[in-house]
Structures are given as structure tokens and as C-alpha cells.
Image (tube, helix red, strand yellow):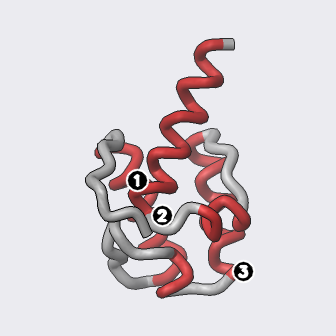
Amino acid sequence: MPTERVQVDEKILSTLLRLAYEVLGIECAPHCNFFEYGDSLAATHMCSLAAKRHGWKISARDVFAWESFTLLAGAIERDKGDQKAH
């Protein structure tokens, strides 16, 4: 896991953490990986909620690939920026 500080949109991060809480029933730390708390079925559920509520296009594979909620939030933020550019 990267040790440098990552700047992300706090709104995206807090929304992502709220979705994780809704799916898992526990508060997750921003620097931790989703899979420290849940499994791939839970990750798929969180991704589905994220798509329905916020239009985010993330998959369970993305949740696995980005090693923390903070890094995943950064990927979501970049994806939103790319969508606006097109």
C-alpha cells in the first residue's frame, strides 16, 4: 500500500465509506482495504449501490485493485473527471 498522502475529494470518500457501512454494517477506515471487512459478494453489492445512487462505474475488481478506500475514491474522482471531459 502506498505510504504517501493521497488527496481525494472528501465528499466522494465519505460517500464511499457510507456505502461500505451500509453494506457491511461496520465503520471502515479510509486507509484500509474493503476486503479486510467484507467479501466479493459484499463488494459487488456496494458497487451496485454506487452505480444506482451516484452513477459511479466501479466493479468488485476495482475494489480489489485499489488497495484502500482512499485510493478507490481517487479512481472514482478521476473517472468522473474523464466523463466530464468527453
Q: Distance between the residues labelled 1 and 3?
A: 19 Å
Residue 64 lies left or right of residue 2; in this view the side is: right
Question: Which quadrant holds residue 42?
Answer: bottom right
User: Where residue 15 appears, x then y in whole percent?
Assistant: 40, 53
Q: Distance between the residues labelled 1 and 2?
A: 6 Å
Name the residue that disc number 2 marks.
Answer: 19
Say above or below: 31 vs 41.
Answer: above
Secondary structure beneath dot 2 equals helix
Looking at the image, the residue that sits furthest to the top is 86
Residue at 71% x, 69% y: name it: 44
Circle 1/circle 2 CB separation < 8 Å: yes
Question: Which amino acid type corresponds to the residue marked 2 in the rendered image?
Answer: Leu
The N terminus: image quadrant:
bottom left
Question: Which amino acid type corresponds to the residue marked 3 in the rendered image?
Answer: Leu
Question: Which quadrant holds residue 64?
Answer: bottom right
Residue 18, can we see it?
no
User: Where residue 29 appears, x then y in whole percent?
Assistant: 32, 74
User: Where residue 79 appears, x then y in whole percent?
Assistant: 60, 35
Name the residue that disc number 3 marks.
Answer: 41
Name the residue that disc number 1 marks.
Answer: 15
Which of the two discs, 1 and 3, labels the residue nearer the N terminus?
1
